[in-house]
Amino acid sequence: MKLVIVDDEMIERKAMRKFIEQSMTGFEVAGEAANGRMAVELAAELKPDLMLMDIKMPGMDGLEAIRQIRKINPFIRFIMVSAYDSDDYAKEAWKEGVKEFILKPGKKEDTISALFRVKKEIEGNPSGSAGREDLMKRELAERMIRKQATAVEYRRFLEHFPDAKGGFSLVISGCTGTELHPVLDRHSPVPYVFAQEKNDHMVILFLAEEAEESVVRNDALRLARMITFSLKGSRAGVGYPVSSIENFWKSYREAEAAWASISADDSVAYQFYHEEKAK
């Protein structure tokens, strides 16, 4: 697994490189960068699987470097490294999709654990071009619902769904993705993509080719009804249709609010946001 170390302190970079090369197997340190600008350049040149990214650096900091790198390669994973134990930094890093955070100077066990967790995540993703394409669609969808996608990313998403004129969102709980996929494959009237799969719920975007809101709304309601009928105990929050993919975040927030309002109510299976509960 190829990685790049990014830190403005040369001693820190060399120490981390030596530790990884001498203590860990399955990792190749492909390069080092002393600042955010160099990190962006190396990401484009080396295409690493993983980057250890310092937060506080002169010029372009680590968070901005991640934002720039994600535009050119959304597959790269990041571990943030910082001497500052700050919730603000952690929250900003989380928004950019960073799942691991190492304090320096830190315990060797913490570094090893973080590296192997990310390695396991990367290796657990589907392989091959089809798998990479599915992963890209999912990551783009997640950035869209978090209102973080760039214009370039929206265009890239439309390359996968050129006929999409908008669509709707569902937030679903009470079943697994393995159970849900065949139901969607059989009953969804439009293409779909999973944007998130969490422990307690899943977020799915449905790409409508029909621009008429009433038609899309009826499709959403019928699909929610079919899911909750087919998978007993499941719940579905439904977001209103949007007319462009740039507004999917609105439909997602509505679906999430609808799901939250019914998830504890056994008498309700699905509903639109702010509507009478459907049974």
Image (spheres, rainbow, N blue to C red):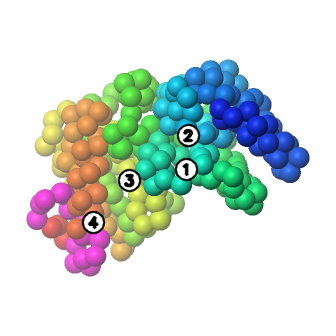
As drawn, 188 above or below 39: below
Q: In which quarter of the image is residue 50?
A: top right
Residue labelled with disc 2: 55
The front one of 164 and 229 is 164
Residue at x 29%, y 49% (from the top left corner): 252
As drawn, 269 above or below 254: below
Q: In this view, does 14 lie to the left or right of 162?
A: right
- Res. 158 visible in picture: no
Q: Is residue 218 left or right of residue 62?
A: left
Give how far across and how far down residue 47 sits, in percent.
67, 28
Residue 273 inside the magenta-drawn segment: yes
Label 3–label 1 contact, CB within 8 A = no
Callout 2: few (<14), some (14-19), or many (20+) C-alpha neighbours within 10 Å? many
Q: What residue type is labelled 3?
A: Val
Residue labelled with disc 4: 260
Nearer-N-terminus badge (4/2)? 2
Residue 55 inside the magenta-drawn segment: no
